[in-house]
Amino acid sequence: MTADQVVNQEKSGSDDSNDTSSEIDPSPPQKNGLGRLLLITLVFLLVGAGLGVFVSLQNRAEKQQEQFRALSSEAVNKEEWGRLEIVAQKWLDWDADNNDALMFLAEAQLQSGELAEAADTLGRVSDGYQAAIAALSYRGEILSSDLHLAYEAESTWKRILELDPENTHAHQRLITFYALSIQRQKMVDQIRESMKRNAEPPEAYAYLILTNAMGFTSGLVQVQNWRKHYPEDETFEVAEAIYKAKYENRSKADDEFEKSPIAPGNQTLINDCLKKYPQNIEILAFHLELNAYFGKTDRVIELLQKAPPEAMKDARFWRHRAWLLRQTQQQQKGLEALEKSLEIDPFSWRSRWLKAEILRQLGREQEAIETQELAIAGKLLEEKLYKTDGRALKWGLVMEMHGYIEQLGQTEVLSSLNYRIRSQGGESMISDSGPEDPGKQPHSLKGRMKQVFDQSP
């Protein structure tokens, strides 16, 4: 049977052969109650007939659904994508909100290269659908990796977390997006939220330790793709400027540890951004690092004065304030600023290193030694993490990271890491447990279809 035959199948009505009109007496009810009895009988007959029609239509509807499903499954198995799209669309013409039909239509669109249409179709599935999370996960990958619609992908991953707050895949995608787009605070918030849910991806620990030293040479390509769709977006423009300033002219194409804050790249765009976005946190932090390195005290003061209120929650600004106070021989106030910096970001070895120097100036030698040793440990760990895929950490590095987190007294992070180690059996933890590369996601729901429809009632 073809799809057209299914859709155009004549919907026959109920059996009207039993004419009850002869049983109706048009005369007024008799005092003996015979008329009332006939009326009650008529009501029961009509109700019974109505129920029969309802059951018949319901049976026909269920049969129609089964026919559409069978035709769609047959088209998938034969990889007849054009036919599948026709059948699925006719199914939706007949039942506009049918989630199974939407999944089949999305499959046809994906296989035909209609990615934008497929993303739209997958977004139409209802939250209560048994395969909603699978559909939305594919939608997120298409939007992010193929269409480069970053904010639409972000909304999709957030929708998944509303349905399943412990969905590691959605947490991972959001963390990666915020890291690549240099939205540090959002990244940290997402990491900590995923840890509270015991749903953090393996790379969460590396990203948390590297919060204020993030750098991906591959990020430039991603951000430039996003900017094509959001040319006026400040976040992406700033991220592109930072990537160009740090990496564009480097001879090596891999991520590497920043041994100094001197940027070897093209600084034209980041200088323009300072004029265009004078209060942007990332732009200010970049220029603060550069000017502090060259000892330009007046320029550091000027930049700190431009900082917006949210800079009070950024560890880097407190570190630069401490640097400035040290230049003016205000060591105690500088030490207090560094304590605030480390409260915000306990993983900042740079703040800890400067703290050791100030402690030494204040004559607190033993504290200075201990603080400096911890700073060196953080610096060395950062170097190793820069050279490692955060989704496939070796066991030795995991334990080094564990020891460092323990030394810092970060009990919540340590608790999450211990939970992951226990739940994944020691050395099997993390290695090969990371989510797939977005670029390697198959553009097919075929594997999902059998799973989805085998579960259908």
Image: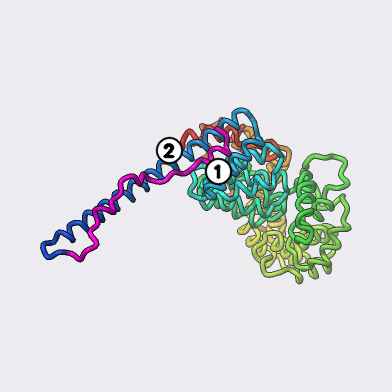
Give the tally of numbered discs. 2
Image quarter of residue 377 = top right
Position of the N terminus by quadrant: top right
Q: Is residue 231 visible?
A: yes
Residue located at (53% from left, 47% from top)? 94
Residue located at (72% from left, 49% from top)? 180
Of residues 37 and 315, which is closer to you in this image?
A: 37
Mark 2 vs mark 1: which is more N-terminal? 1
Structural crowding at the residue carrying mark 2, measured as other residues with C-alpha within 10 Å and reported as few (<14), some (14–19) or many (≥20): few
Image position of 311 (left or right of 200):
right
Q: Was residue 227 drawn as part of the magenta stretch in this picture?
A: no
Q: Secondary structure at mark 2?
A: loop
The numbered dot on residue 91 is 1
Image quarter of residue 28 = bottom left
Chain part drawn in magenta: 1-29
Image position of 245 (left or right of 206):
right
| 272 to 369, vertically: above or below | below
Structural crowding at the residue carrying mark 1, measured as other residues with C-alpha within 10 Å and reported as few (<14), some (14–19) or many (≥20): many
Residue on which the image places disc 2:
457
Image quarter of residue 77 = top right
Of residues 350 and 57, which is closer to you in this image?
A: 57
